[in-house]
Amino acid sequence: MEKKYIIANWKCTKTIQDCLSWVDTVGPHVNASDSYEVIVCPPFMALDAIRRRITDEGYALKVGSQTVSSFEKGAYTGEVSAMMLTDLVDYALLGHSERRSFKHETNEDVAKQVDLCVRYDIEPVVLIRSVEDTIPESVKVFAWEPVSAIGTGNAIDAETAGETISQLSHNGHVRGLYGGSVNPSNIASFMQHPNIAGVLIGSASYEPSTFMEMLNALR
Ligand code: PGA
């Protein structure tokens, strides 16, 4: 059986030190034999330190970026590209609804990011709000995050999420995660659903203790 995913999206909330203490708290409790893969998505400036800590301590954690640039390289002040991230991350979250709204990222931008990730050997995870947000051909993993559920405490129930994800996943050709107000009380319902390949967690992933409660809910 393919492993499910648990993705922790820390957004714009942590210093490098905060990120390191999170992995030192949670890392020892994640095992390579678990039925799920835990992927942490720190802010860019913490990626190098996190990567080193995970390697040095042998934690079974994977690393993702929260976005990548739509540009490959060149005179694009402030951008961080897939080329620059190639040895730092295993995954990249692309097209988060927050980036689509306040950075005005479009489906075309996300498609360029996907191509660059594929070129630089980074697995793209495309985040969609609804069927209006397209999933490019080469993508193998997406996450459905309805805007009404992000950061509101109003998660979609697992049955409805499972149905929507199976419709969006082109009959299972791509693996679909659910995201939006996942917490210790509802995580098991999503993780156990046969059509849902995992969860993408924002606020409930910030505190290592709450994250541990979620892992414990699955054991
Ligand atoms: P939330 O965020 O878990 O705080 O709802 C999810 C996300 O934005 O990825």
Image (cartoon, rainbow, N blue to C red):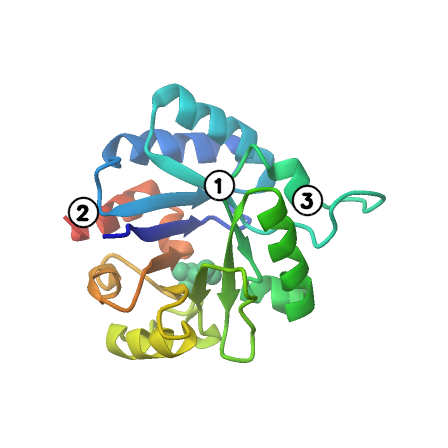
Quadrant of ligand 1 in image = bottom left
> Which residue is the site of mark 3?
81
Q: Secondary structure at mark 1?
A: loop
Q: Amino acid at mark 1?
A: Asp
Q: CA distance from mark 2 to mark 3?
A: 36 Å
Place residue 107 in its image quadrant: bottom right
Q: Residue at x 47, y 48 (%)?
A: 10
Q: CA distance from mark 1 to mark 2?
A: 25 Å
Answer with left or right where residue 157 lies relative to residue 98. Answer: left
Place residue 95 in its image quadrant: bottom right
Answer with left or right where residue 135 lies relative to residue 24. Answer: right
Q: Residue at x 24, y 77 (%)?
A: 159
Whether residue 103 is visible to the viewer of this picture, yes or no, is no
Q: Secondary structure at mark 2?
A: helix
Q: How many other residues sit within 10 Å of disc 2, few (<14), some (14-19) or many (≥20)? A: few
Residue in the foreground of this view, choosing between 3 and 146: 3
